[in-house]
Amino acid sequence: MTKRGVVVKQASLQSQTKQTIEDQKFSLHNFEFSSKIVDYASRGQTEQEVDSAVVAVPTCIYLNLEDLRCFEAVERQYEQWGVVFNNCIAIQPSNPAFPTHSGLVVLMGARKNESLEATFLRPVHFVSAFVTSSQRLVFSAYNRDHQLLTQTVLPGANLANSDSAVPPNTLLSLSANEIHRVTFCAFDGQFTIDDFSFCY
């Protein structure tokens, strides 16, 4: 097994013993991600094979967005990590109402009135992202047959420097068996997502 694979497995195991995925206070920081794991999910690297003989523990992927160019259409850049996006672009926000959670780059919907989608090449059981939105946003998960599995709602705008009771970069997460696709939809609003992650 590669050293890099060991790091991912160990980090995932640590996270699962600290908190369950149903805990709404779940935080990516509790994964204790090392710089190696951030690099592991960069689009510019080749995925390393993980020895299937190792005891099965949840594997979580955290997408490092920092090597995306501003205004780059995002679709298959992370396909090797198991996810394909639709109606998605990378930006470096110039509007202070949409701060990043980490780094300089976030994802947003490419066209207004359409949802940003992420489709997984094999089913996952947990998906999360930090979200900032100009209005109410619905985060939904679907199975392979396009049936709704679960959803969570950001109840209203959470822009920075506003009077919103909800802070910017609110962590939204979904947990269900056999998640094939997720959508973020703010209807006529604008939103950004950062630190997108998912677990098998």
Image: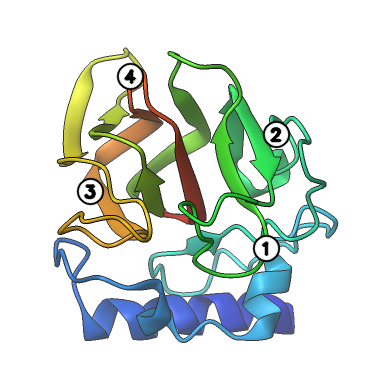
Residue at which label 4 appears: 187
Q: Earlier in the sequence, mark 3 or mark 4?
A: 3
Which residue position is annotated with label 2?
74
- Tell me which residue sits at (51%, 76%) in the image: 9
Q: Amino acid at mark 2?
A: Val
Dot 4 alpha-carbon crowd within 10 angstroms: few under 14, some 14 to 19, many 20 or more: some
Question: Residue at the spot x=73%, y=71% of the render?
Answer: 39
Q: Amino acid at mark 1?
A: Leu
Select label 2 or label 3 by which is in front.
2
Number of residues whose C-alpha sits closer than 10 Å to that of mark 1, classed few (under 14), some (14–19) or many (20 or more): some
Residue nearer the viewer, 151 or 40: 151
SS of the residue under disc 2: loop
In the rendering, at what x and y percent does residue 41 appear? 67, 61
* Label ID, residue 175: 3
| Cβ atoms at labels 1 and 3 below 8 Å apart | no
Can you say which quadrant of the picture contains the N terminus? bottom right
- Say if mark 2 contacts mark 1, CB within 8 Å: no
Q: Callout 1: helix, strand or loop?
A: loop
